[in-house]
Amino acid sequence: MKKIFILVLVAIFSIGIFSFSAFADAGKGQKIFIKEMKPPCGFDGGTMAKKHTQAEWKAIQDAGKLNEEMLKQCPQAKPLKDNYIEHVYDFLHFYASDSGNVPAC
């Protein structure tokens, strides 16, 4: 019984560690914005995030229009890669105009 308990515990711990990287990360989104969007836009991620409320960013993301909205705000930039979208969305949502959070970029 002890071996089964340990095996189940190890399995749960492993799943937790490996699935953690699948979640979006505001910090990673901030780094992506700084690298990919800040130079062509000429403004930082906080300025971009403050252009909408959290509900507005969520509606844009749910509609699948995040890249389009970002390019509307910054036409000189290139569209983001698909695997960057979730992280950048998490960043924009976390630092939206009604969030009360201030990014350090």
Image: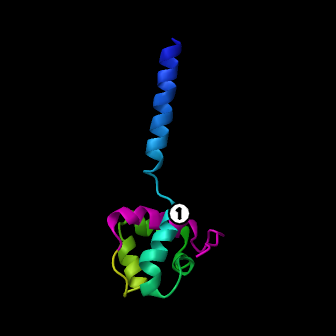
Q: Quadrant of residue 37?
A: bottom left
Q: Amino acid at mark 1?
A: Ala
Instruction: Find residue 74 and report its horizontal and vertical position in percent.
Output: 41, 85
67 versus 40 height, above or below: above
Q: Element at badge 1?
A: helix
Q: Give the residue displayed 52% in from the left and 67% down from the top.
A: 91
Q: Residues within 10 Å of mark 1 (few under 14, many from 20)?
A: many
User: Number of labelled discs?
Assistant: 1
Q: Residue furthest top?
A: 1
Q: Mark 1 — residue?
A: 26
What span is in magenta?
80-105
Left or right: residue 78 compared with residue 20: left
67 versus 8 height, above or below: below
Q: Give the residue displayed 53% in from the left and 63% down from the top.
A: 26
Q: Is residue 64 visible to the viewer in this orientation of the structure? A: yes
Quadrant where the C terminus sits is bottom right
Instruction: Find residue 25 and report its horizontal and vertical position in percent.
Output: 50, 59
12 versus 45 height, above or below: above
Left or right: residue 10 compared with residue 65: right
Instruction: Find residue 75 and report its horizontal and vertical position in percent.
Output: 37, 87
